[in-house]
Amino acid sequence: MNKIATVVEWLRTSKKTIVLTGAGMSTESGVPDFRSASGWWTKTDPQQVATVDAMNSNYPLFHEFYSMRINLLEKCSPHEGHIILAQWEKKGIIHRIATQNVDGFHLQAGNKKVDELHGSIYTFRCKNCGKSATKEAFLNREVCVCGGKLRPNVVLFGESLPEETWMRAIANIKSAELVIVIGTSLEVYPVNQLPMMTNGKTVYINKDIAQHSSYFDCIVQGKAKETLIEINNLLTK
Ligand code: OAD
């Protein structure tokens, strides 16, 4: 059986399927990932923009980086692969998505059961008192009533993942019969531990598969959108 047929067979028989996505899920929407040649971290040092220290010591650079990403996302939207995952949730083919992406594309595409493990870039709070703020206030560099600077509700390096969301993702992955990992280098802890926590079957769909070839039960080298379309065509045949 070829790999696409294998994934289709597993999707058909699994009673609980969880999808775990990373930045590679959104590159075909025009959003750069982090570690590819065209990724954010090949141009910008994450230590300078995506850590608590960076936010506190060089707020203008932190602000510029996240403003740039917010402005770019306004020009991008979910692609057909996202839509397929939303249809699969509606049809009961998949149970839930856990994502490292802060772009909200799974929710925009129509998935309701999404665990945003690294937060969301569309909501904001004061970095001192935690009071919520608007996107406009952040982009205009307004400050909170307490005088604190504003930040997006994303998880920065050195911060914990949102507890409830993280615990839910672990519980679901542990009890899944099938876990499909799409578009992530699995370089970042602790999310990169999730695929190892399941007793179910594991599938890895990624453009570049060199690093993880030994762990997964089935590896499909390919682009997220194209591969999901291929799987869906066979699944709905
Ligand atoms: P990475 O940039 O580390 O990995 C993206 C993976 O997707 C790479 O292995 C690419 O080869 C692959 N890829 C790119 N385009 C693809 C496509 N169209 N189809 C399939 N695969 C594709 O991104 P993440 O693993 O998501 O965290 O990164 C994890 C975390 O590191 C991010 O959430 C972010 C980052 O630093 C924080 O900022 C805290």
Image (cartoon, helix red, strand yellow):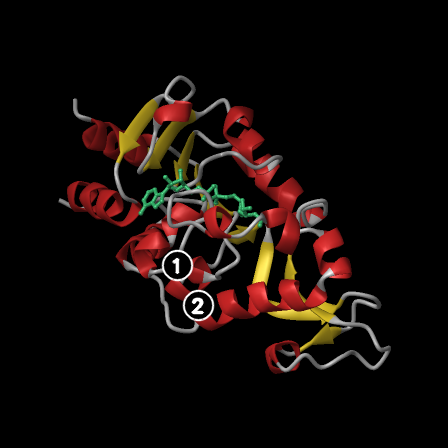
Location of mark 1 (residue): 31
Extreme residue toward the left, this view: 237
Q: Residue at x 81, y 73 (%)?
A: 148
> Crowdedness of circle 1 by 10 Å Cα count: few (<14), some, many (20+)?
many
Whichever of labels 2 and 1 marks the residue nearer the N terminus, that label is 1
Extreme residue toward the right, this view: 146
Q: CA distance from mark 2 to mark 1?
A: 7 Å
Q: Residue at x 70, y 76 (%)?
A: 133
Location of mark 2 (residue): 73
Q: Quadrant holding ligand 1? A: top left
Specify the amino acid type for callout 1: Val
State the mark number for residue 107. Answer: none
Residue 2 image-quadrant placement: top left
Q: Is residue 157 above or below residue 124?
A: above
In screen coordinates, is 147 left or right of 31? right
Asked whether the viewer can see residue 64, the reply is yes
